[in-house]
Image (spheres, rainbow, N blue to C red):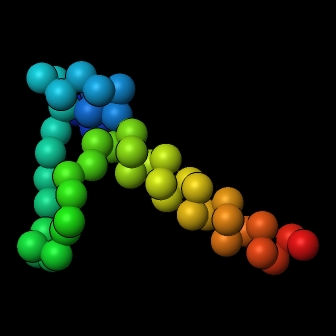
């Protein structure tokens, strides 16, 4: 958990990188911070559609 948190904070020298079996499908490498931000934005946009 600490390694993921360090990656999130941008401290890659103490962070952690990983990929799954579908890594070949990626078009870019994202930081944990970028990934969480993107997921949060997608969720809030999705949620807003149902709250209107």
> Between residues 42 and 13, which one lies in front from this camera angle?
42
Pinpoint residue 50: horizontal percent, then vertical percent: 81, 77
To which quarter of the image does residue 42 belong? bottom right
Figure check: 18 above or below 13: below
Figure check: 28 above or below 37: below
Q: Residue furthest front?
A: 27
Q: Which residue lies furthest to the right in this view?
A: 52
Figure check: 7 above or below 35: above
Q: In this view, does 22 lie to the left or right of 48?
A: left
Q: Can residue 23 be seen in this view?
A: yes
Pinpoint residue 3: horizontal percent, then vertical percent: 22, 32
Q: Is residue 2 visible?
A: no
Q: In this view, does 46 lie to the left or right of 42?
A: right
Q: Residue at x 56, y 54 (%)?
A: 40
- Looking at the figure, which quarter contains the C terminus? bottom right
Pinpoint residue 27: horizontal percent, then vertical percent: 20, 65
Pinpoint residue 16: horizontal percent, then vertical percent: 16, 39
Number of labels in the image equals 0
Q: Which residue is drawn at 28% across and 42% down?
A: 31
Q: Which residue is drawn at 77% across and 75% down?
A: 49
To which quarter of the image does residue 19 belong? bottom left
- Looking at the figure, which quarter contains the N terminus? top left
Figure check: 27 above or below 15: below
Q: Is residue 30 left or right of residue 35?
A: left
């Amino acid at each position: 958990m600490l390694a993921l948190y360090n990656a999130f904070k941008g401290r890659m020298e103490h962070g952690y990188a990983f990929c799954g079996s579908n890594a070949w499908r990626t078009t870019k490498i994202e930081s944990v911070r970028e990934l969480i931000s993107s997921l949060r934005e997608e969720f809030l946009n999705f949620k807003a559609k149902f709250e209107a």
